[in-house]
Amino acid sequence: MVAAATAAGGAVLLPIYDRLSATAPITADSANAVLQGQAMAAGNLLLGGWTLSGACFYATDLPFYAIFAAVKGLSPSVAHDVGAAIYTLLVIAACFLARGRATGTPALFRMAVTLVLLVAPAPGEAVDLLLLGPFHAGTTLLLLVVLLVLDASGDRPLGAVAVGALLTLAALSDALAIYVGVAPIALVAILRLASSRQTQRADVALLAAALLAVPLSMLLTGLIGRVGGFATLPLNGSFARIDDMPRNIGLTIEGALLLFGANFFGQPVASPATLGVLVHLAGFGFVLAACRWAMLAWRRGEETDRVTQVLLAAMALDVAAYLFSNQAIDLMTSRYLIPFLAFGSVLAGRVGADRLRESRLRIPAAGVALVYLVVAALSLRTPLAPAPEAQLGTFLERHHLTYGISAYWQASTVTVESGGRVRVRAVQTGSLPPGPYMWEAEGSWYDAKRRGNDARFVVRDTRDSRSVQRSEMEESFGPPTANYRVGQYEVLVWDRNLLNDIAH
């Protein structure tokens, strides 16, 4: 019965999220993940020859990309399908974690509260972050699975082993998992051991599992590289400067509101959209209230289950890691707060739903839930995102221009939008001559001796300051033999293989 209901719920949510994901244009990050998935589907399971970022998402997101690429081939729809599938599973996992050990009506009420809070990502940046990717939603999904295992296993030693193994995969894939997965579990285990008069074997086992996860993930990463798998580049993370803190505080607040659909900054005073934002703001307030109730119960020494404690610690560490780091740059970096959204929604169901069900606020809460669902339905009217790269790919293919170079943000998007019929590879900007941009890239792309690697053109996005500059291209390669304009793109053509001239 439960399995059938879960499958039915997933079957309803998946096409909804797929449609919403299509309102967001795929980015270079998404396109490169599709290319990595295609490589894995073709048999390169360890991504030999690839150089990935420190957040490689190898065991979190990339298996999904490989599965969908195996079915659909190289297609932009893979990016949307994967984003929708991961978020659907995230919502389902969050609902089951919110249920905890409850049964009957209390269990359904807990799950309903979490479902309502997560069901309707707001069109715009929130959809970009939650339904595309890879932007840490896959990491959050794996950590929810970790907590489900922790909740189900109780004090059994085998549970700690499973938690440690999953944490190792999460830390291997995404450094964020160390802050919002490894550290909270270790911290809670230490606090429980410190507050108990007797040594609890379960907490000792969990502490050992969490502490071993990080070195094991590093060992596994090194092993993958030694056997010919992918290499990774270090993340440029550091602490924020003092004078950055006002901006970071503002971005943390606005980012959290954005993910919860409650970002009222810049909204007109009176509009239907503002009403939806205010209702979502009530949901965000309820999450904060549930956090407060859980913290007060913990401080009073009341019996608080281990998973609830981990959720609280993870939310606090997630906010702190974002607030005090140099990663708070703009609203798109709110992706680091996706665990805060998911864990907060779980906590609201796990801790707050029982209070809500027994209070006089049941009727207003039902009204809020109805508005959430209406907002979700109305968001389906959001138009699909335009794909200028597809038009560019068609033009290039028609002119027999099938291999070229560009800046990172324009390269792989054209490759994926064209289904691989046109391949554009990223080069570094600001250097003469430009060199390979070895970030989420495969080294063989730049080998001029490799069959088919005959780069005859450069793509420049005239609306993006991050794109290559024409003056630099002409200084590196000489005057082009032809010049085309396709919408916002400029295509510069040469009569020789440019890969022979780039710096290696």
Image: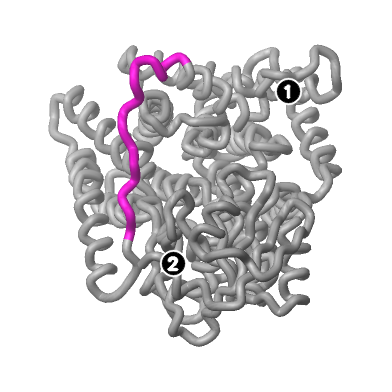
Q: Quadrant of residue 373?
A: top right
Which quadrant: the C terminus?
bottom left
Are the residues flagged by discs 2 and 1 in contact, CB closer than 8 Å? Answer: no
Q: Is residue 245 magenta?
A: yes
Q: Residue at x 18, y 30 (%)?
A: 193
Res. 306 mark: none
Of marks 2 and 1, the one in the foreground? 2
Q: Position of residue 17 (x, y in %)?
A: 71, 50
Task: Determine whether, in the image, residue 195 is placed left or right of residue 310.
Answer: left
Q: Position of residue 215 (x, y in %)?
A: 20, 52
Q: Position of residue 399 (x, y in %)?
A: 75, 76
Q: Residue flagged by tag 1: what amino acid is it?
A: Val
- Earlier residue among tags 2 and 1: 1
Q: Quadrant of residue 406?
A: bottom right
- Please tell me whether the stretch drawn in magenta is mainly helix, strand or loop: loop
Which quadrant: the N terminus?
bottom right
Residue 305 appears in the rendering: no
Q: Residue flagged by tag 2: what amino acid is it?
A: Ile
Task: Determine whether, in the image, residue 219 is placed left or right of residue 84.
Answer: left
Q: Position of residue 285 (x, y in %)?
A: 60, 17
The boundaries of the magenta stretch are 232-246
Q: Residue at x 71, y 35 (%)?
A: 122
Res. 502 mark: 2
Q: Residue at x 41, y 44 (%)?
A: 147
Q: How is the image coloured?
A: one colour
Q: Secondary structure at mark 1?
A: helix
Label 1 sits on residue: 277
Does residue 182 lie above or below 367 as drawn?
A: below
